[in-house]
Image (cartoon, rainbow, N blue to C red):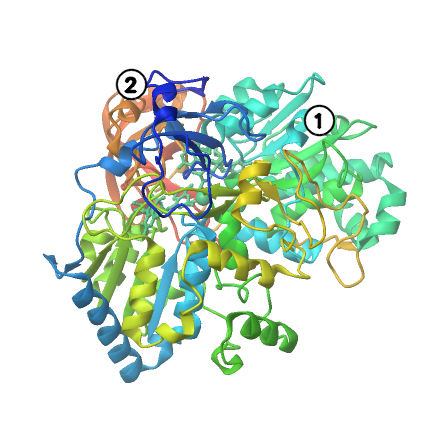
């Protein structure tokens, strides 16, 4: 499969050169840019695909973006961008962009659309109560829109259940941090990639999924050891110094086995444990049972490999632990993430350069949705059952506190279950493609068919989910609106409107204004006039929270400083290109200031392979040119050349030989849920008895088995039982 495909420097311009553009005054003719910029024709904006948060220079003519290049003056990407970033403008001009609202498949006007939305959703709520309507949102819109959506849905519409695709992605990391540290707080800064002596990646393939973070790893001058724990020999595993090809979903066992060896060797930081943690003694007793022989049997690693791995963590060097979806998407994922956190805590590898228990996020604004989605927590990481928090949120928003329900929202899987059982009759899906990306998608789509009213708000009416909608609302995309994203290292970056949305498409922000007015709660949101105005509210909501950003004046600061990491408290000076790491003082966010060791007995895989379905199906990202359900990346001719157009399945050469399957053969892959067709790619990077299929093809989730972590309710996308046949 394609490698990192990294490009540095300035792309060949198809449009006029920047120098010509700079002479053109009044380039910001859109009148929407919320701050005064120099009257030249280049602006910057943070990329709208992955959570790395690269800055792109946008080249404008008459106020419209004509081209872009990677920003060399931004700490995150330092002049680099991956293929998706370079092609970020292309999907905006796709011929299938939504240009008008559609009601039952026919074009309509915005007035009718907004009134229909209000009338039909209200009718459902009147007849069946506030629990009969739900919202599925996203980690891919600007924070200001997320906050607006969460506030309008819960306080304006009185909807009880709102969740987002962040559940598919970051729920585990968020839950693990909250339980261990007392707040959902990834501690690192990207400089840690460069300052680490040993980088350990669990279930993470940054060469494909975070190519520019990987470039930061390559900039490490300390001759680091790079360890990859992944059942597959991925692009990242090939580039690493050590690859441990464990059996799928045996990570928790491995992590306890490593802790066992560290305890045995006395390779623990006693002073740190005593000053900054609780629960260590119980944990040390618990891991006594995870001796190398037992761990070797479950993980498939040899006892020698286990000792070698433990050696890498011991000693004075700086060790950093990184994880992504190979950990977050599992049936015991929260405890697995905490297994990594425990290793960092017991060795004192936290709060110092080149260390940390570091969850790498996925979507451009997953971090924003974790803080401001108004889903799992009350707007701004607050607690709906804490009276002080309720009063604060009500005060900042100027709403009646009684509007804040104390009832926790259902999680994504429970919402789909509610739809399947007919309890939820109205669903509003915004900037996510549920029909393709949800686990066991055939069952999900059967459920969606039962809805009385499905509203889909997306850039394209052609997505798998939008095609099922009763009401489709055409949304502006990245590049067509202003606001902020929060990247993986907690850096708040600015996103700019550099293109006009096509036809009558509106920004999610303006759609929300319309809908609020049609609902009759326009007054409640009269202060929500622009993303910049909302940013001021977000600052107030953040005050005295761990992510306090009240020291940021406004968008101007974000522009000038090259993004700003949280926290930046009132009175603190924002600094250009600064880097900030949490927990340098050994103080965590629990009331006693300590981090917790948390652990549980490992459990078997929910759907293990058997005689009828002898293979384990792994899923994940295929190439750096494909983004999720491919609604955006599929629109670029350049990107389309970088990946196979048809669904494919990777198969080990030995298995292929035994089964008489040849490279490029068409095969069927079946699970207990469905049977799909795919092209075989014979590849020794997958182990015997395992298959890999990239999630970008809609076939893949028809196969997956709906199992969830009990703490985070994140789906276990990466392990189900299948068979393959010619
Ligand atoms: N090009 C591209 N980049 C992306 C995205 C995209 O769609 N395309 N999506 C973005 C998003 S939202 C996310 S969340 C990230 C995801 O980024 P990653 O998590 O890095 O990507 P994945 O390929 O989903 O999963 C990583 C690895 O987990 C491994 N794995 C599977 N099961 C196990 C297991 O039991 N244990 C271990 N240790 N490993 C396992 C898989 O083999 C895979 O190589 O990428 C982001 N970046
Ligand atoms: N089998 C398997 N399944 C997986 C995964 C896996 O590893 N394996 N990974 C999971 C993960 S980590 C994730 S994050 C999910 C991602 O799953 P999805 O969120 O469903 O994937 P996307 O294709 O990113 O969908 C985003 C949608 O929003 C639209 N959109 C983009 N920008 C805007 C905007 O500004 N406004 C509006 N209104 N719409 C917009 C796009 O056109 C697209 O339809 O998939 C999950 N599914
Ligand atoms: S690495 Fe992520 S943020 Fe950077 S250009 Fe690529 S998709 Fe955009
Ligand atoms: Mo994700």
The residue shown at (73%, 40%) is 344
Q: Is residue 427 above or below residue 437?
A: below
Looking at the image, the residue that sits furthest to the left is 106
Q: Is residue 10 above or below residue 648?
A: above
The residue shown at (49%, 31%) is 210
Callout 2 crowding tier (Cα within 10 Å): few <14, some 14–19, many ≥20: some
Residue 257 pos. (x, y %): 71, 39
Numbered tag placed on residue 217 in the rendering: none
What residue did someone put label 2 on?
663
Numbered tag placed on residue 195 in the rendering: 1
- The image quadrant where one finds the N terminus is top left
**Quarter of the image holding residue 420?**
bottom left
Frontmost residue, 410 versus 630: 630
Residue 675 pos. (x, y %): 25, 42
In front of the other: label 2 or label 1?
1
Q: Left or right: 106 with respect to 115?
A: left
Q: Left or right: 346 with respect to 117?
A: right
Q: Secondary structure at mark 1?
A: helix
Q: Left or right: 95 with respect to 6?
A: left
Residue 213 pos. (x, y %): 55, 29
Frontmost residue, 301 versus 107: 107
- The image quadrant where one finds the C terminus is top left
The residue shown at (40%, 76%) is 158
Q: Left or right: 657 with respect to 576?
A: left
Frontmost residue, 146 versus 614: 146
Q: Secondary structure at mark 2?
A: loop
Frontmost residue, 412 versus 305: 412
Q: Is residue 409 above or below residue 499?
A: below
Q: Is residue 44 above or below residue 459?
A: above
């Amino acid at each position: 499969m394609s490698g990192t495909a990294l490009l540095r420097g300035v792309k060949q311009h198809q449009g006029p050169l920047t120098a010509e553009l700079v002479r053109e005054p009044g380039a910001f003719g859109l009148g929407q840019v919320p701050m005064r910029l120099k009257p030249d024709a280049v602006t910057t904006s943070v990329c709208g695909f992955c959570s790395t948060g690269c800055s792109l220079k946008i080249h404008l003519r008459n106020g419209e973006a004509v081209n872009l290049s990677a920003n060399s003056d931004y700490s995150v990407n330092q002049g680099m961008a991956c293929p998706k970033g370079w092609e970020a403008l292309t999907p905006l001009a796709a011929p299938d962009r939504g240009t008008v609202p559609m009601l039952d498949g026919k074009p309509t006007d915005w007035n009718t659309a907004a009134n229909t939305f209000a009338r039909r959703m209200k009718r459902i709520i009147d007849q069946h109560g506030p629990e009969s309507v739900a919202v599925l949102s996203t980690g891919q819109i600007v924070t200001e829109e997320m906050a607006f959506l969460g506030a309008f849905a819960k306080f304006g519409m009185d909807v009880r259940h709102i969740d987002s695709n962040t559940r598919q992605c970051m729920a585990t990391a968020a839950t693990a941090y909250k339980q261990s540290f007392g707040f959902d707080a990834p501690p690192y800064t990207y400089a840690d990639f460069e300052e680490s002596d040993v980088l350990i990646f669990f279930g993470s393939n940054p060469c494909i999924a975070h190519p520019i973070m990987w470039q930061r790893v390559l900039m490490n001058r300390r001759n680091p050891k790079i360890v990859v724990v992944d059942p597959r020999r991925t692009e990242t595993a090939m580039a690493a110094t050590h690859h441990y090809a464990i059996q799928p979903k045996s990570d928790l066992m491995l992590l306890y086995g490593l802790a066992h060896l560290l305890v045995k060797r006395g390779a623990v930081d006693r002073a740190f444990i005593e000053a900054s943690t609780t629960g260590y003694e119980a944990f040390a007793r618990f891991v006594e049972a995870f001796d190398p022989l037992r761990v070797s049997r479950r993980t498939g690693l040899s006892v020698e490999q286990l000792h070698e791995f433990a050696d890498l963590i011991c000693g004075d060097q700086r060790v950093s632990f990184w994880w992504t979806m190979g950990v977050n998407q599992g049936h015991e994922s929260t405890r697995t993430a905490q297994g990594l956190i425990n290793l960092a805590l017991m060795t004192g590898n936290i709060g110092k350069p080149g260390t940390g228990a570091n969850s790498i996020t996925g979507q451009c604004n997953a971090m924003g949705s974790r803080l401001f989605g108004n889903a799992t927590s009350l707007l701004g990481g607050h607690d709906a059952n804490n009276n002080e928090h309720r009063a604060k949120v009500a005060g900042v928003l100027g709403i009646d506190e009684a509007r804040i329900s104390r009832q926790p929202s259902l999680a994504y899987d429970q919402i789909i279950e509610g739809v399947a059982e007919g309890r939820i009759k109205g669903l509003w899906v915004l900037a996510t493609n549920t029909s393709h990306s949800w686990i066991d998608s055939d069952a999900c789509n059967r459920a969606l068919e039962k809805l009385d009213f499905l509203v889909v708000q997306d850039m394209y009416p052609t997505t798998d989910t939008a095609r099922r909608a009763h009401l489709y609302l055409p949304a502006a995309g990245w590049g067509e609106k202003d606001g902020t994203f929060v990247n993986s290292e907690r850096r708040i970056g600015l996103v700019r409107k550099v293109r006009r949305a096509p036809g009558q498409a509106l920004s999610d922000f303006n759609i929300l204004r319309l809908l609020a007015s049609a609902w009759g709660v326009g007054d409640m949101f009269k202060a929500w006039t622009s993303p910049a105005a909302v940013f001021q509210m977000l600052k107030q909501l953040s005050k005295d929270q761990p992510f306090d950003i009240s020291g940021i004046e406004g968008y101007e600061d974000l522009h000038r400083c090259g993004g700003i990491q949280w926290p930046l408290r009132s009175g603190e000076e924002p600094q250009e290109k600064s880097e900030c790491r949490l927990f340098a003082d050994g103080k965590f966010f629990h009331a006693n200031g300590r981090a917790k060791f948390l652990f549980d007995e490992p459990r078997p895989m929910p759907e293990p392979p058997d005689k009828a379905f002898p293979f384990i199906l792994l899923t994940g990202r295929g190439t750096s040119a494909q983004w999720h359900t491919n609604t955006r990346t599929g629109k670029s001719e350049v990107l389309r050349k970088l990946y196979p157009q048809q669904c494919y399945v990777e198969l080990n050469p030995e298995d292929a030989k035994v089964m008489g399957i040849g490279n490029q053969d068409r095969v069927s892959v079946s699970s207990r849920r469905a049977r799909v067709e795919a092209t075989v790619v014979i590849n020794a990077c997958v182990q015997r008895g395992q298959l890999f299929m990239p999630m970008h093809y809609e076939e893949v989730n028809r196969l997956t088995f709906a199992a969830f972590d009990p703490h985070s309710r994140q789906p276990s996308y990466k392990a189900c039982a299948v068979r393959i046949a010619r």
